[in-house]
Image (spheres, rainbow, N blue to C red):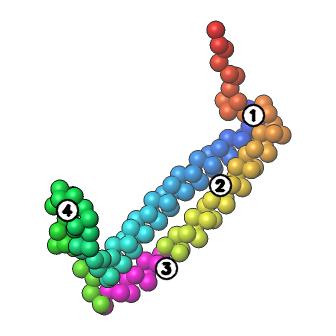
């Protein structure tokens, strides 16, 4: 049978593992939403062509290597004026994800603090966390 301290440490470790995984997932979703927002903004604003303003300042081989505007524009989604609310929805979703991410981060910090406190109160529960250093020969 395990002591209450040992059970608490195990539980806190599992909580931390789950919270770290959730933090990674929400970070992944935020990166996707922000990338989609970047694409939507680029489609709406249509960046200027590359190379036109610096053609004579660049070596010829560099100038010849610039992608054509048509190639670049094919990467951008076709955004119609009626799609502009999509940008607002993406911004709102990013804000919602940011708030959730902050909550997950705070919960992870609290759980970590509780784990540290529990380990300080019950050092025998540290188990494999505190390993003896290897012996040098």
Which residue occupies the foreground of this view, 95 or 126? Answer: 95
Residue for point 33% across, 82% down: 45
Q: For marks 3 and 4, give the one nearer the viewer.
A: 4
Q: CA distance from mark 1 to mark 4?
A: 65 Å
Nearer to us: label 2 or label 3: 3
Q: Nearer the viewer, residue 35 or 19?
A: 35
- The chief SS type of the magenta part is helix
Is mark 3 in CB contact (under 8 Å) with mark 4? no
Residue at numbered disc 1: 125
- Name the residue tied to disc 2: 108
Secondary structure at badge 3 equals helix
Contact, CB < 8 Å: mark 2 with mark 4?
A: no
Q: Earlier in the sequence, mark 1 or mark 4?
A: 4
Q: Is residue 94 visible?
A: yes
The question of residue 123 being in magenta is answered with no
Q: Residue furthest right?
A: 121
Q: Which mark is residue 92?
A: 3
Given residues 22 and 52, the one toward you in this image is 52
Whether label 3 touches label 1, CB < 8 Å: no
């Amino acid at each position: 049978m395990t002591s209450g301290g040992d059970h608490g440490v195990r539980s806190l470790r599992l909580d931390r593992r789950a919270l770290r995984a959730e933090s990674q997932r929400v970070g992944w979703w935020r990166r996707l939403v922000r990338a989609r927002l970047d694409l939507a903004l680029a489609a709406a604003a249509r960046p200027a062509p590359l190379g036109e303003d610096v053609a004579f300042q660049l070596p010829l081989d560099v100038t010849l290597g610039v992608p054509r505007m048509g190639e670049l524009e094919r990467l951008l989604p076709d955004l119609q004026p009626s799609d502009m609310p999509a940008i607002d929805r993406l911004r709102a979703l990013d804000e919602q994800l940011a708030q959730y991410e902050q909550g997950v981060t705070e919960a992870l910090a609290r759980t970590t603090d509780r784990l540290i406190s529990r380990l300080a109160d019950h050092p025998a529960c540290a188990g494999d966390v505190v390993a003896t250093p290897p012996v040098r020969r």
